[in-house]
Image (cartoon, rainbow, N blue to C red):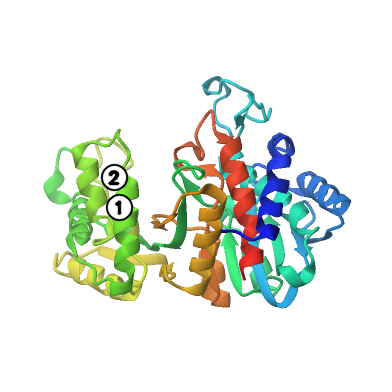
Amino acid sequence: MSSPLIRSVLDKVDRLKFEIASVTSKLIKFQTISPPSNTLECAEYIKAYLENAGIEVSFHAKEKEKVNVCAKVRGKPDKKIVWLGHLDVVPAGLREKWVHDPFGGVFDGERIYGRGSSDMKGSCAAAMIAAKVLSDVAEEDKATVDFWFTCDEEVGSPDGTGWLVEKGLISGDLCLIGDSLSRDPSKEPYIDVGCKGYIRLHLKAIGRTAHGSMPFYGDNAIEKILLAIESVKNLSNYSLNLPADLEESVKSSIEYLLADEKLSEKQKDAIKKAFYYPTVSLTMINGGVKINVIPDYAEAFFDIRISPGVDPENIIRTLHNFISTLHMKGVKAGVIGFEGGYYESWDSKYAIALRKAVEIATSVKPKPKILLGATDALRLKKTLGITCLGFGAGIEELAHAPNEYVTLSGLLSAAKVYAILPLLL
């Protein structure tokens, strides 16, 4: 049974259901495309809305137009939640692919359409409603919450979360990431408990040019790079040694991914391996200058993802061993970036509190999942060392897609979770 205070908060959110739709629609209408990630006008709207509710709001910007917003809802001084979301969106793409104006914020009674609705202006609107409701709760009855709305997550957060963390402007005991997607947050809720790490690999091959009719005088760099590519792809059969306490979240993540009815058998087999082995994606390849010239240079790039709890440096050493067995002159492999993933225990005190909040809000027990990609949570986890968990209103398959939308039921579920959690700590 929930407390009278929690029931009161839930009722207040429900009474604001048309307001949450309106706020989402207004946020969508601000074309905060990254790049250039200009969020100033959108930030001013958020500031005016929240200040009207009596909430303390501040702007933080490395560059004038790229504004990050912090809304502080004061509560108990010894407990602080960081709610983290981003205001920027990816470009809309071809207009003819959209039924509605991608920046129109059309509301049909259950869905709000537009670029960024699921990723993630819907969750930002839910956070604004939660902040408004929480501002009426006595300080001694809730944790302090800093609601952060950042400017440039879609391009790596150099002027957003990255800069804010570097300057020491973000701090707290728990980070709740609003940039969290699922199939249906109101009926099938999932909590993000971590994300994979990555290795970005650059292969290059040096050869010798010759006329295409006389290949025996040359040294074909493309043929070399193709051999090296096959060697790197063997990494996808390298079994990872995962921590024992990650198993429940891994199994739940695989079940989540396999529930997609559109999957082929080949895709299902790949998903079953996706956490127990590295995923190895060849993403770019370049080589050759002319059809009748033996190429003297070729290069390829890989995006390699590894489960949290696995040391990326061990995988990098394995990669170099694979390539060295080729005994091929002129082939080099360079790592141009890597980062280990992270995960939280499903039974940690903060995870249990969030699980309770989600179950109260949706009447469904949530399940854990690990992100295949990464969010700004990774930056906070690595720098601040605080617990980072994710829950949001967005629908996964719609992120970055035409006809993106968010549902009113998803928005209400997210707003309730964001408003309840501070009462449970």
* Res 99 visible: yes
Query: 135 or 162: nearer the eye?
Result: 135
Q: Are marks 2 and 1 in contact (CB under 8 Å)?
A: yes
Residue 230 placed where, x, y %? 18, 54
Residue type, numbered disc 2: Leu
The residue carrying mark 2 is 258
- The three-letter amino acid code for the residue at tag 1 is Ile
Task: Locate residue 116, reporting x and y percent.
Answer: 60, 40
Q: Which mark is residue 317?
A: none
On-image quarter of the C terminus: bottom right
Q: Is residue 222 among the parts visible in the rendering? A: no
Gap between marks 2 and 1, in whole Å?
6 Å
Which residue is labeled 1 in the image? 254
Say few, some or many: other residues with alpha carbon within 10 Å of mark 2 (under 14 / 14 to 19 / 20 or more).
some
The correct choice, above or below, for 207 with respect to 163 in the image is above
Find numbered disc 1 in the image and state the secondary structure of the residue it sits on: helix
Query: 70 left or right of 275?
Result: right
Judge left or right: residue 24 versus residue 327: right
**Residue 184 screen position, x and y as percent:** 47, 41
Picture quadrant where residue 149 is located:
bottom right
413 or 164, which is in the foreground?
413
